[in-house]
Image (spheres, grey):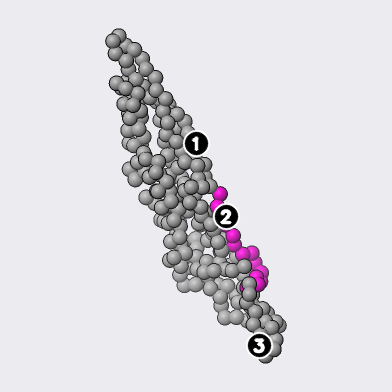
């Protein structure tokens, strides 16, 4: 086990691991005398969140891989010591990454799917052609979604990926940082108690301050 800088590890997947909503329409036509009116009906869609793997160390002593040394002919093994309080704090930090990913999904694919499904209750038209009727539906989607999302699915992917990447701010800013206190020698074990740092801010920065358009 390697604690790294943050103590835990959460593997946030990219947008490719999510199920993207689809904007599709069916068209119908109505003849009125010599003219034909075309209408578009938005089809319902779905989106699916991704599952992210997350790890944190439980309380206790954890052997540091490959960390042994010989002192005066005696072999010593190094361990991280995780107190119940620090274990719970690291767990909370990894949960913040998961909450960030959830918010990124909620602000993109979930919102898009919900908006498309709300449009499915309406009929768009009349228009001169099926394509024009579909454009009326697309324009309605554009009006209801945040401008940053637009109606281009490739942009939806890009925005989701950008929001998912924003969670790294917690680590790059040191908000999840932990570090070892001075080591203690107990028999043939060298213990490194893990503690917070001056930059640790777990529980202080909500997802809404990081994951935003």
Determine whether, in the image, residue 26 is placed left or right of residue 179: left
Rendered image quadrant of residue 167:
bottom left
Q: Is residue 140 visible?
A: no
- Inter-mark Cα distance, 2 to 1: 23 Å
Residue bearing mark 3? 71
Q: Position of residue 194 (x, y in %)?
A: 58, 73
Query: What's the magenta region?
Result: 51-64
Residue displayed at 49% across by 36% down: 46
Looking at the rendered structure, which numbered label has been put on residue 53?
Answer: 2
**Residue pushed farthest bottom?**
72
CB of mark 1 within 8 Å of CB of mark 3?
no
For numbered disc 2, what is the local secondary structure? strand
- Inter-mark Cα distance, 1 to 3: 62 Å
CB of mark 2 within 8 Å of CB of mark 1?
no
- Residue neighbourhood size for the residue with mark 1, other residues' Cα within 10 Å, grouped as few (<14), some (14–19), many (≥20): some
**Above-or-below relation of 124 to 103:** above
Looking at the rendered structure, which numbered label has been put on residue 46?
Answer: 1
């Amino acid at each position: 086990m390697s604690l790294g800088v943050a103590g835990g590890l959460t593997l946030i997947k990219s947008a490719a691991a999510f199920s993207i909503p689809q904007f599709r329409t069916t068209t119908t036509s109505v003849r009125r005398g010599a003219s034909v009116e075309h209408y578009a009906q938005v089809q319902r869609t779905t989106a699916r969140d991704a599952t992210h793997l997350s790890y944190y160390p439980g309380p206790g002593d954890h052997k540091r891989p490959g960390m042994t040394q010989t002192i005066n002919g005696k072999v010593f093994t190094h361990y991280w010591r995780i107190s119940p309080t620090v274990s719970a704090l690291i767990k909370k930090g990894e949960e913040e990454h998961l909450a960030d990913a959830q918010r990124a999904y909620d602000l993109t694919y979930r919102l898009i799917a919900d908006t498309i499904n709300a449009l499915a209750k309406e009929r768009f038209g009349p228009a001169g052609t099926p394509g024009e009727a579909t454009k009326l539906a697309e324009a309605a989607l554009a009006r209801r979604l945040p401008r940053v999302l637009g109606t281009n699915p490739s942009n939806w992917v890009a925005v989701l990926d950008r929001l998912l990447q924003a969670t790294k701010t917690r680590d790059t800013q040191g908000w999840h940082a932990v570090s070892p206190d001075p080591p203690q020698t107990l028999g043939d074990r060298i213990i490194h108690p893990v503690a917070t740092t001056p930059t640790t801010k777990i529980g202080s920065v909500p997802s809404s301050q990081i994951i935003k358009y």
